[in-house]
Image: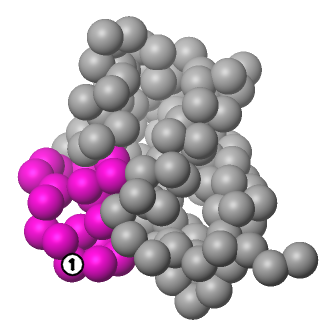
Amino acid sequence: MFMKRIEGREDINYIVRKFYGQVRENEILGPVFTKAIPEGEWDFHMEKITDFWDSAIFGSMTFKGNPATSHVNLDKKNDYKITQDHFAIWLKHWNETINENYEGEIAENMKMRARKMATGLYLGMWHHKPDDLKPSVD
């Protein structure tokens, strides 16, 4: 079966909206996002995330923001309880959304960038957790 290739902002917006629709329904991720994004701000958030991916993939330079700071604040707002498991679930949904709808080099690039981003964001959050709440590494 032939699937569509990611060609521009419309495709990215489709992925973002479909993905976040699933994430909001997820029993683990849903409450985190509900706490972070008030009901009336979801459309704004979808456009901002579309800007992020459009900038990352197509160089549109439309994204304004700091994902690292936003995620550190998100972890704080959730009492520092965001774990690697949250990011694993996030990546699973991201990859499934892309795999179910798109193929090709850009689709693979978006999945690879998401893996790198998840690692970087989690490490940034981990460094900002209070020491007594950091998972033990021994």
45 to 125, vertically: above or below? above
Magenta segment includes 51: yes
In the rendered image, residue 2, in percent from the top left (x then y), is placed at 80, 79
Residue at the image position 62 percent from the left and 54 percent from the top = 94
Q: Residue furthest right?
A: 1
Please tell me how many numbered marks the rendered image carries: 1
In the rendered image, residue 15, in percent from the top left (x then y), is placed at 54, 53
Q: Place residue 71 in its image quadrant.
A: top left
Residue at the image position 17 percent from the left and 71 percent from the top = 60
129 to 92, vertically: above or below? above
Front-most of residues 99 and 133: 99
Tell me: 14 left or right of 42.
right
Front-most of residues 5 and 56: 5
Instruction: Mark yes or no: residue 14 visible.
Output: yes
Tell me: 129 left or right of 61.
right
In the rendered image, residue 87, in percent from the top left (x then y), is placed at 59, 48
- Amino acid type of the residue that numbered disc 1 sits on in the rendered structure: Gly
Magenta segment includes 138: no
Mark 1 crowdedness (10 Å alpha carbons): few <14, some 14-19, many ≥20: few
Residue at the image position 89 percent from the left and 77 percent from the top = 1
Instruction: Mark yes or no: residue 77 visible.
Output: no
Residues in magenta, as a range: 49-67
Q: Which residue is mark 1?
A: 59
Q: Quadrant of the C terminus?
A: bottom right
